[in-house]
Image (cartoon, grey):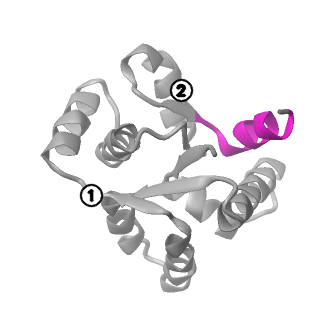
Amino acid sequence: MPTIYLDACCLNRPFDDQSQDRIRLEAEAILIILNHVKNDEWQWISSTVLGVEIQQIPDAERQARIKLLMPLARHSIHVSQKEEKRAKELQTLGIHPFDATHLACAESGSVDVFLTTDDQLLRQAVRLSAQLGVRVENPLVWVKEQSEK
């Protein structure tokens, strides 16, 4: 069973303006992923930092909708000193603090893939792939790969 980590960008995507093809396709990919999670075909590993980031969403309705998805996560990584230390290492490589903490949690959770729609993070992950302990991918690309297996 594949294990995945969804960042806040992914969870927000189904609630973004769907007028652009890319956003609509990525939103559909997230919904497909969540359906597989709901059907116990894929396992979603979350983290306490994801909860903190969701709490900071200014749109109360969007925040409430995303919170409804959180019980689908099978396990949540608690950010401990280990993850904080790793996040600081990743920040020295130029990764944004929230993203670095998400990556550290995904590494701790030994997930198969960390999914994000954040283009900057995806570019950084390609550049730093040898230094990351987790594969980082766009959800649309990953869902396509899974459907071809």
Residue 147: x and y, percent? 84, 40
Magenta segment:
137-148
Predominant SS along the magenta part: helix
Residue at mark 1 to residue at mark 2: CA–CA distance: 27 Å
Quadrant of the rendered structure where residue 87 is? top left
Quadrant of the rendered structure where residue 97 is? top left
Q: Residues within 10 Å of mark 2 (few under 14, many from 20)?
A: few
Which residue is at a point 71% across and 38% down the rendered structure image? 142
Of residues 127 and 134, the one drawn nearer to the viewer in this rendering: 134
User: Can you say whether 72 is above or below 45 in the image?
Assistant: below
Residue 36: x and y, percent? 72, 59
Label 1 sits on a secondary structure element that is loop
Quadrant of the rendered structure where residue 32 is? bottom right
Which residue is at a point 49% across and 77% down the rendered structure image? 67
Residue 102: x and y, percent? 37, 47
Which residue is at a point 17% across and 41% down the rendered structure image? 82
Instruction: Decide if residue 116 is in sight here.
Output: no
- 139 drawn magenta: yes
Give me the disc on residue 78: 1
- 142 drawn magenta: yes
